[in-house]
Image (cartoon, helix red, strand yellow):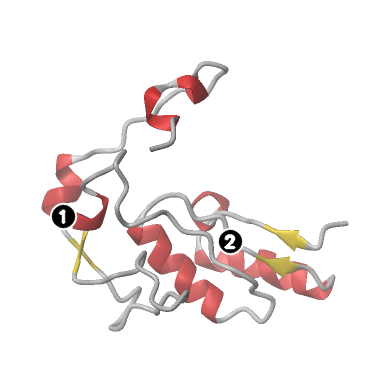
Amino acid sequence: MADIIQPDLVKCGGILEMKKIAAMAEAEYVMVAPHNPLGPVGSAATLHLSACVPNFQIQEMVRASNKRVPWRTDLIFGATVNQPKNGRLALPPGPGLGIDLDETVAEAHPYRRKPIGRDFWRQPHFLFD
């Protein structure tokens, strides 16, 4: 049995699927601390989910100023989803997820699948600042 689970909204199937996972956890008195390593769009979606599940405990986030991905903060216009104020993250205002994607930035940095294996974790981009 677990006291806390850490599902990843982006990898588990999206907002609805993670809400179902949180509901199953709640039935067993298990708290949810969403895993959130993937940037501002995933952060916005995870924040909205976290705000509506009763067994939410804490939000994991990627620092807004990340040296490995310097364009991360440019991906969305105006929203500050990864910038806590007084130890808290605010829900982005506006319709949908409350963010506007900068498609030019997204197109300039297409997804590239990287193999995961023993040497993957030794690559320079996994070293700490």
What distance separates the C-alpha of mark 2 from that of mark 1?
26 Å
Question: Residue at coordinates 38% horizontally, 24% vertically from top-left?
Answer: 124
Image spot of residue 51 (x, y percent) = 53, 80
Image spot of residue 39 (x, y percent) = 37, 54
Q: Quadrant of residue 70?
A: top left
Question: Residue at coordinates 38% horizontally, 38% vertically from top-left?
Answer: 129
Q: Quadrant of residue 67?
A: top left
- The answer to which of 61 and 93 lies nearer the viewer is 61
Image spot of residue 37 (x, y percent) = 46, 50
Q: Secondary structure at mark 1?
A: helix
Q: Is residue 21 left or right of residue 70?
A: right
Q: Is residue 85 left or right of residue 59?
A: left
Q: Earlier in the sequence, mark 2 or mark 1?
A: 2
Q: Is residue 53 above or below residue 100?
A: below
Q: Is residue 38 left or right of residue 119?
A: left
Question: Residue at coordinates 43% horizontally, 74% vertically from top-left?
Answer: 89
Can you identify the residue that label 2 sits on?
34
Q: Amino acid at mark 1?
A: Glu
Q: Is residue 122 above or below residue 84?
A: above
Can you identify the residue that label 1 sits on?
103
Q: Residues within 10 Å of mark 2 (few under 14, many from 20)?
A: many
Question: Residue placed farthest to the top in the image?
Answer: 119
- The answer to which of 48 and 64 lies nearer the viewer is 64
Q: Secondary structure at mark 2?
A: loop
Q: Quadrant of residue 109?
A: top left
Q: Residues within 10 Å of mark 1 (few under 14, many from 20)?
A: few
